[in-house]
Image (cartoon, grey):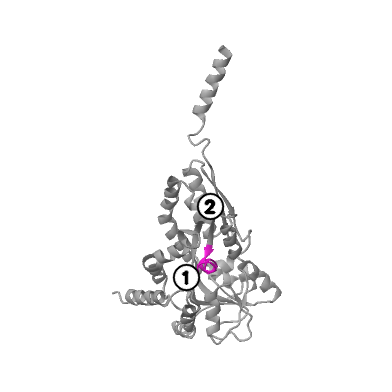
Amino acid sequence: MPRLLASLGALALLLVALPAHAGEKVYEIKFGTIAPDDTPWSQVLWDFKERIEKDSAGRVKVTAYLNGALGDEKAMLQKMRFGQLNMGGFSTGGVSTMVPELQILELPGLFKTKEEADYIIDKVLGPQLEVAMEAKDLKLWIWGENGWLDFGGQKEITGAGSFGGTKVAMQESAVQLTMYDAIGVKPTPLPIPEILGGMQTGLVDTYASSPIFATAAQWFAYTKHWADSDHMYQPAVVVFSKRFWDGLPPDLQTLVVGYAAEMTPTLRQAVRGLDAELFEGFAENDIAVRRWTEAEREAFAAATRPAHAAMVKRGDFPQAMLDQVYKALAEYRARP
């Protein structure tokens, strides 16, 4: 009997020593992205991982797959659909393969400043686009950004009429295709992870990208000219599988939502603050960087404006949504 009492006493001490969540379900977040490590995007991911694993007292575990380890954005979104991933960071161009309404944010020449883009996303279209994503089993967590897209490659691009003799790589999205169609360019659609190989083999020699992504993906190594065109703004989103999200306990949902208000501006500012430094790096690697003039930007915007109507005609988003954006931008620009 004394031995039994001692054993029971030891067991009681062990139970007291165990954390309060012992025996509770552990939720594994499998996170996929084409973003490489050591970038602002991965830094937000590692910050989220550290916070959620600590603040949930071990009830959440995050496993990350970066740099397209599980395929391109389209492939990872399919994995989310089938439960092989349950969270990811994607460009809106990638998510638009499932949620075409997102392409309204990438219309060429739509935004003139980052403040305009933030206003339309945060104050005008955000709730509608969130509903559109939820209809496709995607739960929005935060908005991020890839940034302003420029043109890089072997030839200097100065406007809509300067693509002659180029072999243009294009992200697989309808809005980019309609933009190139508007100016008579026949691009080669490629998954993002395959563009580097396409440049190495000569399949393509020109591309559109933000400076930070072209650097992180090593595209700059096959670039002689960089046109700082800012011809298209490309946001990004971090999303959960809605089925996975709905299965999280309310307290964990509240925990995750609580990070968003800080992480959205943090991610935006981290991406936006790097262009000047990156352009210095381009120059050190003998890449000629030339900023388009305001007149050149306006001319390109005018030449690609038919892409706006073409996207409506395709059925990617309704004319009413486009008119809503035009009206909101006009009002924003008229402010004192």
At mark 1, the secondary structure is: helix
Dot 1 surroundings within 10 Å: few (below 14), some, or many (20 or more)? many
Magenta-drawn stretch contains 96: yes
Indicate which label's residue lies in the foreground, 2 or 1.
Answer: 1
Asked if labels 1 and 2 touch by Cβ distance under 8 angstroms, the answer is no
**The magenta stretch spans which residues?**
90-102
Residue 171: image x %, image y %?
A: 58, 72
Give residue 306's mark: none
- Give the residue at the far top of this rendering: 1
Q: Residue at x 48, y 34 (%)?
A: 20
Going by the numbered disc 2, the residue's amino acid type is Trp
Residue 120: image x %, image y %?
A: 39, 69
Q: Quadrant of the C terminus?
A: bottom left
At mark 2, the secondary structure is: helix
Going by the numbered disc 1, the residue's amino acid type is Glu
334 or 4: nearer the viewer: 4
Residue 139: image x %, image y %?
A: 47, 58
288 or 147: nearer the viewer: 147
**Alpha carbon distance from label 2 to label 1:** 30 Å
- Compare marks 2 and 1 and give the one earlier in the sequence: 2
Residue 221: image x %, image y %?
A: 64, 70
Above or below residue 49? Residue 131 is: below
Above or below residue 304? Residue 118 is: above
Q: Residue at x 39, y 74 (%)?
A: 325
Dot 2 surroundings within 10 Å: few (below 14), some, or many (20 or more)? some
Q: From the image, tell me which residue sits under label 1.
A: 101
Q: Quadrant of the N terminus?
A: top right
Magenta-drawn stretch contains 279: no
Q: From the image, tell me which residue sits under label 2.
A: 46
